[in-house]
Amino acid sequence: MRVSLFIPCLVDTLLPEVGEATVRLLERLGLALDFPQDQTCCGQPAYNTGYWEDARRVARQFLRAFAQSEVIVAPSGSCVSMVRNHYPRLFRDHPSDLEAARRIAGRTFELTEFLVRRLGLTEVGAGFSGKITYHDSCHLNRELGVREEPRTLIKAAGAELSEMPEADRCCGFGGTFSIKFPEVSAAMAQRKAESIALSGAGTVVTCDPGCLLQIKGYFSRQQKEVRVLHIAEMLAAAK
């Protein structure tokens, strides 16, 4: 199987270590990877703020970049949900684009979803000791229905999973939401931090770059020593 990597904007610009960890993990599993150089954003920021024509221009570039891909994998439930669930709506009045969007939607997977559902793997050669808590990102959990897959991979890596209260409550990032409503976003981040503290874990893992930035940023500003990792970073740690 040849896998095309889709690296979201936040990873490309702010979290390159997440992209690098994704590559190490998939190569360790023996997968052939390619990275279409003309990929850009999936179009979600413009789509969510109502600029649909701008979103369509960006989404068409995505469709062109990955037109020949057998399987597309991204370390972001949010971006995968955009491609799978919202491209059909975005192109509903554009028949030629709609066909391509539906075709690519069926080939696009979030990383943990791909490992567990597509490849049938739970053991990926990862080794990670210590107590971990897991934050369910909204799009991954609610729009893609991926909830148990990350937890299965965490436990198979040897970590002790300690569930936090309200693990599926939003962290407050929400893309442009955190910019438009900073006070609300900060309050939501504080509530999430309190839940993480109640888990007793020194490490919190998530599958979405936006959640990672939000939670990590909050702890950094509060000068709290809590380790925040993308699940790709955790799984890339070999035994």
Image (spheres, rainbow, N blue to C red):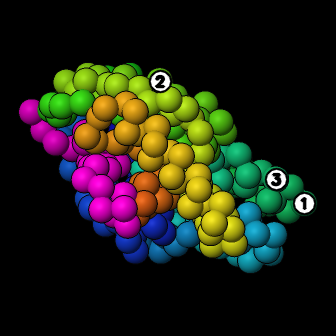
Residue identifier under label 2: 148
Among numbered discs 3 and 2, the one appearing first in the sequence: 3
Residue 93 is marked as: 1
Q: Quick check: can you spot residue 150?
A: no
> What distance separates the C-alpha of mark 3 from that of mark 2?
28 Å
Query: Which segment is the magenta one?
Result: 219-239
Q: In the drawing, does residue 179 fall left or right of residue 28? A: right
In this view, the residue in front, 172 or 27, is: 172
Dot in front, 3 or 2: 2
Dot 3 alpha-carbon crowd within 10 angstroms: few under 14, some 14 to 19, many 20 or more: few
Number of numbered markers: 3
Measuring 50% from the left and 45% from the top, which residue is drawn there?
Answer: 192
Residue 59: give x, y in percent of width and height: 66, 66
For the C terminus, the quadrant is top left
Q: Are marks 3 and 2 in contact (CB under 8 Å)?
A: no
Q: Are marks 1 and 2 in contact (CB under 8 Å)?
A: no
Q: Are marks 1 and 3 in contact (CB under 8 Å)?
A: no
Measuring 47% from the left and 59% from the top, which residue is drawn there?
Answer: 214
Q: Amino acid at mark 1?
A: Asp
> What distance separates the C-alpha of mark 1 from that of mark 3?
8 Å
Residue 231: give x, y in percent of width and height: 34, 43
Residue 70: give x, y in percent of width and height: 47, 46
The quarter holding residue 155 reads: top left
Dot in front, 1 or 2: 2
Dot in front, 1 or 3: 3
Q: Amino acid at mark 2?
A: Glu
Residue identifier under label 3: 89
- Local SS, label 2: helix
- Local SS, label 3: helix
The quarter holding residue 35 reads: bottom left
| Image position of 167 with respect to 107: above or below | above
Q: Amino acid at mark 3?
A: Arg
